[in-house]
Amino acid sequence: MAARFARGVSIKPYLYVLAIIILLAELYVTYYFRISYDFLLAFFPLTYLLIKSIDLSKSYNLTNVLLASYLYIFPSILIITKALIVGNEIPILIIALLLTYILGQELYRLRSKYLNYLLIGFN
């Protein structure tokens, strides 16, 4: 989770279009052919492009802390929530979103240098 990506000097706009096309193609194959492996691989290039395009370490404000929390902490909280709670997908997703929001706000409020660096990658 504490991986730091240096901001890209210039990111070609066609990479965003290509990542979205890959995501749409994967959604089409998943729903048309009923092939489901319960995870979309196309989110990796989209997340990588988002991380490369936004400089999170420039300023320490609530928006950057929440954005980094949703990028880095949310997948872990979602997996833990799915493991602990057996139920429908939407309530588990809402619980994970709220827990990530609360944790992001607490990380911003505490301003712990080591804890922030460990969990969200900047301090």
Image (tube, grey):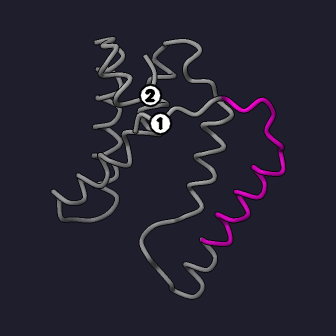
Mark 2–mark 1 Cα distance, whole angstroms, equals 6 Å
Q: Secondary structure at mark 1?
A: loop
Residue 109 point in image, percent of width and height: 32, 12
Residue found at x 56% / y 54%: 44
Tag 2–tag 1 contact (CB < 8 Å): yes
Instruction: Name the residue carrying label 2.
Output: 121
Q: Is residue 60 above or below residue 92?
A: above
Residue found at x 42% / y 71%: 38
- The stretch drawn in magenta includes residue 83: no
Q: How packed is label 2: few (under 14 Cα within 10 Å), some, or many (20 or more)?
A: many
Residue 64 point in image, percent of width and height: 51, 22
Foreground pick, 17 / 115: 115
Magenta span of residues = 7-26
Foreground pick, 21 / 55: 55
Q: Secondary structure at mark 2?
A: loop
Residue 114 image label: none
Instruction: Name the residue carrying label 1.
Output: 3
